[in-house]
Amino acid sequence: MNVLIIGNGGREHALAWKVARSPRVEQVLVAPGNAGTAREPGMENVAVDATDIDGLVALARDRQVHLTIVGPEAPLAAGLVDRFQSAGLACFGPRADAARLESSKAFAKDFMVRHQIPTAGHATVDNVADGLKFARTIGFPLVLKADGLAAGKGVVIVDNEDQARSTLEDMLSGQSFGAAGHRVVVEEFLVGEEASFIVIAANRQVLPLASSQDHKRRDDGDRGPNTGGMGAYSPAPAVSEDVHDTIMADIIRPTLDGLASDGCPFTGFLYAGVMLTAAGPRVLEFNVRFGDPETQPVMMRLESDLVDLVEAALEGRLDRTAAKWDRRVALGVVLAAGGYPQDYARGEPISGLDTEWPGHVKVFHAGTAIDDNGSVVTSGGRVLCLTALGDDVAQAQAEAYRWLAHIGFRDAYHRTDIGFRAIGRD
Ligand code: AMP
Ligand code: GLY
């Protein structure tokens, strides 16, 4: 069969790579893909943008695509799955109404309150005075979140009333995030360790995937500005069996049941970003897609055929399906362009990609492109994510950094401590 993967990041390279390993798959199309997916055997990039829904429907028809898997949130929020379904095309992801769990933080918070899903206390406001009034009742630090999609940048932690006022003004006026900031969630600050809990879901059926943890801050020690994620590993030792069971019972099942009973059942990858607080797990955010870079280590460990799992979901057989995992730890380090998450250079040639990589190492591309001379160059902030397997976190980390040293480009930047919390725990 032919499978279409939508998106162009490291997540999509990892999903496409895993799908291409299925003996049932002839060709993997990636729209629009990156230099990594262009160079994989059995894979072809097609120059259709991830948000060009008409173009994608036409592509799936023309190329006899049997199954489409959506990587990023924007096309899901824009109703890509609704359109594919109307066209009679199999597509894995939530419809737009269920995708509101990610595309509107105000919707997600209301939903959690209504269904008693544990999360930080909050108020949704549309003016500065109400925001400050609520802020005074919960105290500082606190968290301000632009309601709409803001590419992972819409969350600001403020330490005092002055910061709260200026951030609220910038968000609500539309200055910082456009219309996404016209409503703001003011939220209690939670303390604890974060984990990414990702499941395959189909209506009320669910198959939990391996746990993972990412590092969102740019610099070592989890300092510096927030990014899309500078590295990740799986499993996350903080997610013990007990914690896993609590998250399934108190968060994942009530979320799927709640969406189903609200008339917007969820199908797709559901990602709960969870803070493990002293009082138990609390939802920080929902994503309606796989995480990036969490996908890269999780796909390295998945031994089952991803196409089988996705089909089981689409055909209502998920509750009779299990996933098999490599017992080893996978750890991925992001190599970014200097300056990310602010301005950075593009078009820098990347050296070392033709290294002979051992079987336990994989270079997943993200912001890469092929230039007019056929060379692989940088084209985004997060350029690639080198992922390695090891017997424990320390070994996976050592292998990832050892092999990452083979790759370079001008002004390349990476953290040197991915996995440090898990190693500290061992
Ligand atoms: P979000 O996009 O909601 O996941 O927020 C991005 C990051 O901000 C999270 O991964 C956390 O590190 C941090 N964050 C979000 N909400 C809270 C909160 N209520 N308390 C503490 N940190 C938070
Ligand atoms: N790594 C966080 C995310 O994908 O949202």
Image (spheres, rainbow, N blue to C red):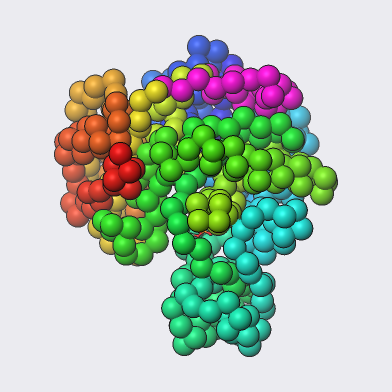
Is 104 left or right of 410, judged from the image as shown?
A: right
Q: Residue at x 18, y 51 (%)?
A: 410
Residue 266's x, y, as percent?
71, 41
Q: Residue at x 74, y 25 (%)?
A: 316
Q: How many marks?
A: 0
Q: Quadrant of the C terminus?
A: top left
Q: Residue at x 59, y 72 (%)?
A: 186
Between 404 and 272, the one nearer to me in the picture? 272
Q: Residue at x 63, y 61 (%)?
A: 105
Q: Quadrant of the N terminus?
A: top right
Between 373 and 199, the one nearer to me in the picture? 199
Q: Which residues are magenta?
A: 305-326
Indicate the quadrant where residue 301 lies.
top left
381 versus 314 height, above or below: below
Residue 115 visible in this rendered orientation of the protein: yes
Is 396 left or right of 4, judged from the image as shown?
A: left
Residue 315's x, y, as percent?
73, 23
86 versus 342 height, above or below: above
Is 204 left or right of 270, judged from the image as shown?
A: right
Indicate the quadrant where residue 404 lies.
top left
Indicate the quadrant where residue 133 lies.
bottom right
Residue 345 visible in this rendered orientation of the protein: no
| In magenta segment, residue 241 | no
Residue 150's x, y, as percent?
53, 62
293 versus 381 height, above or below: above
Residue 413's x, y, as percent?
23, 52
| In magenta segment, residue 309 | yes
